Image: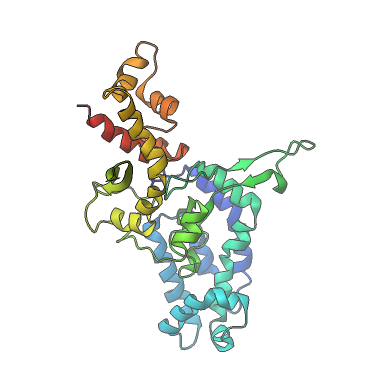
Amino acid sequence: MLYLPDPTEKILKNYINNLKKKVVKRIKKLPDIDTKPLEDILENILIDKPAKLLIHQTYIIDEILKKNINEFDDKEFQYLLSVWTNIKKSEYDINLCLKYKLAISIFECFDYDEFISKSKKTSYDLALALNRNTCTYCNRSYVNTIVVKDENTNRVNDKGRITRPQFDHWFAKSKFPFLALSFYNLIPSCSICNSSIKGDTEFDLDTHIHPYIKEVGQDFSFSYELKDLDSYKVKIKNFKPSSKIENTLKEFKIEEIYNAHAMFELKDLIDLKKKYTEDYLDMIFNESFKGIGVEEHDIYRLVFGVEKEEEDFHKRSLSKFKRDIIKELRELDK
């Protein structure tokens, strides 16, 4: 898993400008309530950091819903959240819908599908601002944002917005619908990690790593072990048992996914060392480019096609994996 850098003030300001007026327009149409409290915290909901986001969801429930819905019931409301996707598709449990009509109306004020997913400009503006080449969770799949200008107008239109990362809701929007548009809740990821693996799995800041929160002691390394005479198995090591990083890696099945590369990228790196001289890697790093101004991070790109530095891992697929394996193989020469 990779970490995301904090966005600049300009990025956050542009994000607010893209969404705030649209959301306020819906909020003002909410029936029979004072909408000012919700309008007042909207900007915070959009750009506050992860630790504060749950406070806003709680505020909406306690200060708006419970004060305006007669006989509000926490268990009923949790049930509403659990079936919300089905309710949107059908007239499922009409009595529940009628009782919590206000809640449903507020859900729709934060409609991710309408404001981001279906709005190509907004979604692509966000993807371009984040500028990530690979999935935040696996660093295995490329998620480049590709935008081209129309040849006739020299402008970007929807046809020119070709591909972008998916945005995973770290706090699942099925359970935290009021956070569906929150900047720090939208993690650029690949379809496999977002849709096939994570889906609506509930994450918690106390148990899982949030990509915008860099925590001391939450590290890991890729390694390998011999599987049989001529094949290898990817292993993950150097993490604390029962740590947030272990929970996160298990949730995204990183070890299992990377074992799909064991017979290819992993074996190639090991064969590179075995089939040539024992100190072949040391020769690449210390002799081959000596005296021509090529630094070690350049060698990782030129020879192995990956990035060496952690902050650059996102630029090229499998960078952390290959960097860790190369480092381990080089240690064997010492």
Q: Residue furthest front?
A: 229
Eyeballing the image, is 25 above or below 128?
below
* Count of residue discs: 0
The x and y percentages for residue 332 are 22, 31
As drawn, the residue found furthest toward the right would be 152
Q: Quadrant of the C terminus?
A: top left
| Residue appearing at x 57%, y 62% in the figure | 112
**Residue 31 drawn above or below residue 164:** below
Q: Is residue 176 above or below residue 12?
A: below
Residue 159 x, y percent position in the rendering: 72, 47
Task: From the viewer's side, name the closer residue of 139 and 258.
Answer: 258
Question: Can residue 320 be seen by looking at this rendering?
Answer: no
Q: Is residue 44 left or right of residue 240?
A: right
| Residue 319 position (above or below residue 333) | below
Q: Residue furthest left?
A: 334
Q: Nearer the viewer, residue 226 or 331?
A: 226
Give percent across and percent down for residue 292.
39, 12
Residue drawn at (37%, 44%) of the image: 262
**Of 263 and 48, which appears nearest the observer?**
263
Which colour assignment does the render follow? rainbow
In the displayed structure, does residue 97 sit left or right of residue 48? Answer: right
Judge whether residue 167 can be spotted in this image: yes
The front one of 210 and 115 is 210
Residue in the picture at 37% in, 49% down? 259
Q: Is residue 48 left or right of residue 123?
A: left
Q: Name the residue furthest top.
A: 291
